[in-house]
């Protein structure tokens, strides 16, 4: 019986493919894309202010609301944070990835990869709250900064209205530090992958032809690892763009896109505006991905 | 200081040990200005390590390396006036052919119009005119090989290092490139150091050959010297094919207690009634195997009283039908006494 089924399936590879792909494709279409489509529809409805009811008529007025100054600020703030986090992650990740890919012994490499990915094993929420304690007024980081007699510098940084606050935990600087930490592995791994694909002989050839290490880095390593950096930035940028838990737990409670969506669809009950705001990051990411594809980022994944 | 008698490369008791492994051990070597020098040996014999030490990718654990009289043992690769053609070509995949070739000049800040002019000259030299705009991925193996050569030669290095550059090419292309490499070397007049494990390649192209075995240099000499006067049994066995005869068999043939080598092509295969001249050695036996190879035929002869000899005869008048009939027949082998080489065991 089993043999007959096997033979039957062996002669029909298309049927096997259908059986294997059917369920996930169905899930993808109905649950994932379906809900996105639903979101898209809702973004063209509007909330009747007086009654607080959703009017299911096509309108662009909800989208117009996004361009009101308060909402526009949210977009600028979130995109700015995402860009800053991406840049910082790239700068921190590159040397680490380079060392792991090109110099570490196989044994050390295993340990390094484990060390890089181990934070991902623990709950994201736990790590956010751990950071809340680390960054608190009386937290370990402040203690350490005092120890180095750098508390003056910290106070000076926190005194800036746009990035400061009463303590690290309650300032955009603190939020920035936490974002950089949380998304760092997503930057390291693609860069490492792209560097591992650069044969050592290319680096030798470059120095053989007279290039000093810094020149080799600029003319050979960086261009060849760039797709990896772009791939990593897709993660760091989009994850920061959509995150709403870290900005709720930390920072100065100024809205980020994710927080705004969360509060519009929750307490405010303004699902059309929440949907319209969700479309923002989606559009930004689609444009970003199109650019990334042109830069060859998907070859590095 | 530099004159024609200063060796291009001089090794003074150079060793490279990796922990317990002696990749290169106490190597002494002089490579003359303008010569085509091959480092020949089986894989793991230390020839590539020697090349990498000349290039600067590896440093000797003991001893000194001189480049035209200058001690370069501790100089990084970018401060040495040598260039390398890599086994995998190591072309930069993100640059086109022109930028690859111009890389060394670009690093040395040679103006762009000058670079482009010299790239065109180089492409002419390696017979790839008009290829400057292509990407390495659009080239065949042989073409990449030429680009790698042009990229190294454009810098006019004092010494050009070639690390098994023909290894990845098919036989026809390899033979063609051997001839071309040799003619390019004669035209540019640069010292070439060529690493290979292919003895035929080394014999074809080289002015002199160093034979490596287990981190040591067994013999240095011209192709003819290496072929006709192998210094050790290893050399005799590695270069060309050789019959190595020792012990009882050798004593029975020569009458004395020696070890000698004899090339298969020097042995004459004759009928059992052949009368050999007085200056020849003689051995009788049965033909156990016949391999017809077109140009020549290889016979494996089992000697009476033990021992095998390989004999090669050209098919000047014989066809495959003729030679295959010889299998199983009794034969008399004879060869001139002067053709044996007594070797140290």
Image (cartoon, coloured by chain):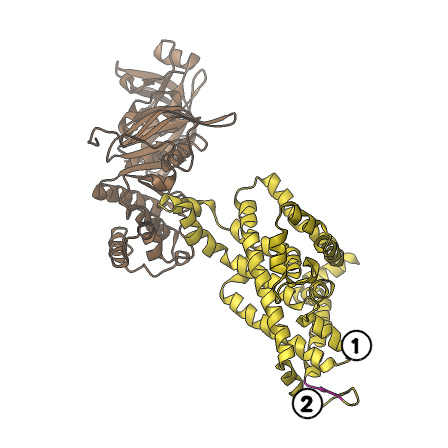
B261 vs A266: above or below: above
Give the quadrant of residue A120. Answer: bottom right
Front residue (pair A193, A258):
A258
Q: Chain ID for label 1?
A: A
From the image, state whether disc 2 or disc 1 is nearer to you. Answer: 1
A132 vs A77: above or below: above
Q: Over which residues does the magenta segment extend?
A: A44-49
Q: Is mark 1 on a helix, strand or loop?
A: loop
Q: Quickly name the residue at label 2.
A: A58
Residue B274 % position (x, y):
30, 20
Q: Quickly name the residue at label 1.
A: A267
- The residue at 73%/66% (across/down) is A248
Decide if residue A40 is on the left or right side of residue B305: right
Q: Which chain is yellow?
A: A
Residue B300 % position (x, y):
41, 27
Give the quadrant of residue A276. Answer: bottom right
Mark 1 crowd level (few <14, some 14–19, many ≥20, 10 Å Cα):
few
């Amino acid at each position: 019986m089993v043999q007959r089924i096997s033979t039957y399936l062996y002669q029909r590879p298309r049927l096997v493919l259908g059986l294997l792909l059917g369920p996930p494709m169905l899930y993808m279409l109905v649950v994932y894309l379906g809900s996105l489509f639903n979101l898209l529809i809702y973004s063209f409805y509007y909330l009747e202010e007086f009654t607080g009811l959703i009017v299911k008529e096509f309108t662009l007025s909800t989208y117009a609301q996004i361009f009101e100054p308060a909402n526009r600020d949210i977009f600028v703030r979130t995109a700015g944070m995402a860009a800053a986090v991406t840049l910082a992650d790239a700068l921190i990740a590159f040397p680490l990835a380079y060392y792991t890919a090109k110099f570490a012994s196989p044994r050390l490499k295993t340990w390094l990869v484990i060390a890089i990915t181990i934070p991902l094993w623990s709950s994201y929420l736990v790590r956010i709250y751990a950071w809340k304690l680390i960054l608190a007024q009386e937290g370990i980081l402040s203690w350490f900064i005092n120890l180095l007699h750098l508390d003056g510098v910290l106070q000076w940084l926190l005194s800036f209205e746009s990035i400061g606050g009463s303590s690290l935990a309650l300032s955009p600087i603190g939020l920035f530090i936490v974002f950089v930490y949380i998304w760092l592995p997503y930057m390291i791994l693609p860069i490492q992958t792209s560097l591992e694909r650069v044969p050592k002989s290319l680096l030798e050839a470059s120095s053989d032809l007279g290039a000093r290490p810094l020149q080799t880095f600029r003319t050979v390593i960086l261009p060849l690892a760039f797709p990896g950096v772009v791939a990593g930035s897709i993660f760091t940028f989009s994850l920061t763009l959509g995150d709403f838990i870290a900005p709720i737990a930390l920072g100065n409670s100024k809205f980020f896109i994710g927080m705004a969506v969360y509060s519009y669809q929750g307490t405010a009950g303004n699902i059309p505006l929440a949907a319209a705001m969700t479309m923002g990051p989606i559009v930004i990411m689609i444009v970003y991905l199109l650019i990334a594809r042109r830069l060859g980022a998907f070859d590095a994944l | 200081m530099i004159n024609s008698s200063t060796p291009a490369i001089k090794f003074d008791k150079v060793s490279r040990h990796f922990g317990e492994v002696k990749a290169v051990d106490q190597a002494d070597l002089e490579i003359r200005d303008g010569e085509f020098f091959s480092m020949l040996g089986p894989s793991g014999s230390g020839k590539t390590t020697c090349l990498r030490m000349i290039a600067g990718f590896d440093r000797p654990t003991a001893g000194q390396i001189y480049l035209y009289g200058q001690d370069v043992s501790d100089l990084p690769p970018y401060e040495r006036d040598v260039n390398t053609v890599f086994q995998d070509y190591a072309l930069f995949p993100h640059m086109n052919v022109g930028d690859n070739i111009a890389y060394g000049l670009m690093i040395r800040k040679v103006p762009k119009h000058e670079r482009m002019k010299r790239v065109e000259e180089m492409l002419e030299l390696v017979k790839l005119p008009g290829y400057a705009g292509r990407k390495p991925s659009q080239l065949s193996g042989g073409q990449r090989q030429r680009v790698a050569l042009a990229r190294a030669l454009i810098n006019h290095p004092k010494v050009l290092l070639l690390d098994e550059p023909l290894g990845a090419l098919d036989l026809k292309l390899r033979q063609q490139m051997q001839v071309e490499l040799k003619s390019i070397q004669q035209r540019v007049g640069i010292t070439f150091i060529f690493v290979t494990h292919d003895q035929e390649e080394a014999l074809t192209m080289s002015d002199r050959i160093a034979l490596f075995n287990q981190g040591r240099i067994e013999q240095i000499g011209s192709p003819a010297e290496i072929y006709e006067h192998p210094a050790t049994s290893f050399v005799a066995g590695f270069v060309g094919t050789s019959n190595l005869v020792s012990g009882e068999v050798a004593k029975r043939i020569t009458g004395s207690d020696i070890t000698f080598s004899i090339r298969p092509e020097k042995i004459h295969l004759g009928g059992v009634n052949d009368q050999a001249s007085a200056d020849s050695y003689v051995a009788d036996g049965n033909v156990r195997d016949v391999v017809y190879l077109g140009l020549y035929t290889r016979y494996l002869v089992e000697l009476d009283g033990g021992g095998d000899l390989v004999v090669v005869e050209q098919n000047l008048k014989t066809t495959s039908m003729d030679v295959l009939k010889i299998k199983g027949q009794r034969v008399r082998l004879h060869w001139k006494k002067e053709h044996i080489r007594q070797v140290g065991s």
